[in-house]
């Protein structure tokens, strides 16, 4: 059988049939190898997502204050020393950077003994059962920051190192998408 000339009538049909195959190969390559090409995957938040629905009311009887507001809870079971105060200062800056949305946010701190430092003057103290909270959360950390939604559910968990621009980015996104709080 003689070879088919390139400008025969079957060439457009061949192109039409091979194009979907090429697109499928390109799409699967992007799906499986996108990390190597600098394309961000399905991650949309910076903090650690708390998959299991954990309500802050399960570990604190005081959590009903600030109804309908987002909360940042600074958890530090010891006295609030320099690392804790540095995180509190970053979170104070985050609240100021939110501008008009800062009214939708309440700052809570859990320390032992309760906070008396002047940098924590506008933070509300909250008493948490840290042992129970440690069992409910997917972390072995003892010092961390929680982001709690207006329905009292713990949404995201941050290490002290993440409680800065990562927290700000997530908070801006959540406040923009949220119709409550």
Image (cartoon, rainbow, N blue to C red):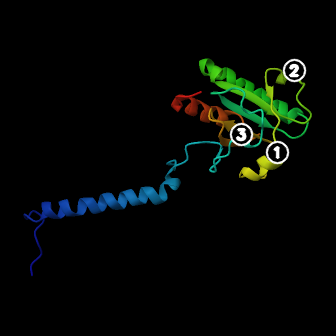
Report if residue 94 is visible in the image. no
Task: Specify the quadrant of the image occupied by residue 65.
Answer: top right
24 shown above or below 5: above
Residue under label 2: 118
**Number of dots carrying numbers:** 3
Q: Find residue 151 and report its horizontal and vertical position in percent.
A: 62, 35
Q: Secondary structure at mark 2?
A: helix
Task: Specify the quadrant of the image occupied by residue 129.
Answer: top right
Mark 1 / mark 2, whichever is N-terminal: 2
Q: Secondary structure at mark 1?
A: helix
Residue under label 3: 56
Observer-nearest residue: 163 or 12? Answer: 163
Q: Find residue 21 and report its horizontal and vertical position in percent.
A: 28, 63
Q: Find residue 147 and report its horizontal and vertical position in percent.
A: 68, 37
Mark 3 / mark 1, whichever is N-terminal: 3
Residue sitting farthest toward the top: 100
Mark 1 vs mark 2: in front: 1
Observer-nearest residue: 8 or 22? Answer: 22
């Amino acid at each position: 059988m003689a070879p088919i000339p390139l400008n025969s009538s079957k060439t457009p049909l061949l192109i039409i049939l091979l194009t979907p195959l090429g697109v499928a190969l390109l799409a699967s390559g992007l799906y499986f190898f996108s990390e190597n090409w600098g394309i961000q995957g399905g991650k949309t938040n910076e903090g650690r997502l708390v998959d299991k629905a954990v309500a802050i009311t399960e570990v604190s009887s005081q959590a009903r204050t600030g109804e309908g507001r987002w909360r940042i809870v600074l958890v530090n079971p010891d006295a609030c020393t320099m690392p804790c105060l540095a995180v509190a200062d970053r979170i104070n800056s985050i609240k100021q950077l939110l501008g008009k949305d800062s009214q939708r946010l309440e700052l809570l701190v859990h320390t032992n003994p309760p906070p008396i430092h002047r940098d924590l003057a506008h933070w509300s103290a909250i008493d948490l059962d840290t042992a129970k909270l440690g069992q409910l959360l997917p972390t072995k950390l003892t010092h961390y920051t929680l982001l709690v939604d207006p329905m009292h559910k713990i949404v995201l968990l941050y290490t002290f190192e993440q409680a800065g621009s990562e927290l700000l980015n997530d908070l801006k996104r959540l406040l923009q998408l949220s119709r409550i709080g």
